[in-house]
Image (spheres, rainbow, N blue to C red):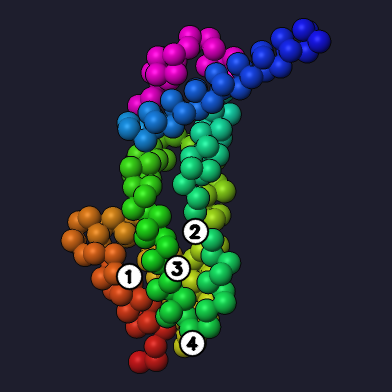
Amino acid sequence: MPRKYQLRRRAERQAETRRRIVEATVALHEAQGVARTSISDIAERAGVERATVYRHFPDERELLTACTGHYAAQHPQPDPAPWGEIADPGTRLRTGLAEVYAYHGRTERMADRAGRDLADLPVLREVLAPEFAYWARVRDALATGWPVPEGRRALVVAAVGHAIAFATWRSLVREQGLDEAQAIEAMVAMVRGLAADD
């Protein structure tokens, strides 16, 4: 019995250490970005030795994967499934963009830091592949149902992809000074204009 208790306590301590490392890493990534975060930074913030970080996460991919999962659990993405019940494509896009833009507002710092580091860190792009696939599903869900003239389908899909992008939200809301409702109406008008007959 004491042996089982000791093993359980050891497992609990290891899980707690792993959690502290992940939380420290996520906080540092949000504050300064992946590229500017060192293992020494992580160890200091988590209150562990560098060797402990490496013992729990032998490579960068494993650490980034754990951090991405932790962050996603704390900041769930909008679920595009209910949008499929909305028949009118303009109303569907407006509804989807409201949820997407609220999400961008909640996750702005992390999205900004990750976007800055993507070009320099191929491993980050690999770890975020499911994220890119998610946004493609959101785009496709919101681009469906528009009465598009011959030859304009790709334009509408691209416009919806542009509308849902973090960079678009940041440009319209942070740089151009629109509130989110105005930004949504601008993007719905853009897509509607592309979908309409001349």
Instruction: Reply above or below: 135 against 124.
Output: below
Whether residue 196 sits left or right of residue 51 in the image: it is left
Q: Quadrant of the C terminus?
A: bottom left
Question: Tag 3 or tag 2, which sits nearer the N-term?
Answer: 2
- Mark linked to residue 184: 1
Q: Magenta: predominant secondary structure element?
A: helix
* Span shown in magenta: 36-56
Describe the element under mark 3 as helix, strand or loop. helix
The amino acid type found where label 1 is placed reads: Ile
Instruction: Identify the residue position indicated by label 3 in the image.
Output: 96
The amino acid type found where label 3 is placed reads: Gly
Whether residue 88 sits left or right of residue 6 in the image: it is left
Question: Tag 3 or tag 4, which sits nearer the N-term?
Answer: 3
Q: Give the label, 2 or 4, closer to the camera.
A: 2
Farthest residue, direction right: 1
Asked whether the residues under the numbered discs 2 and 3 touch, taking CB atoms below 8 Å apart as contact, a structural biologist would say yes
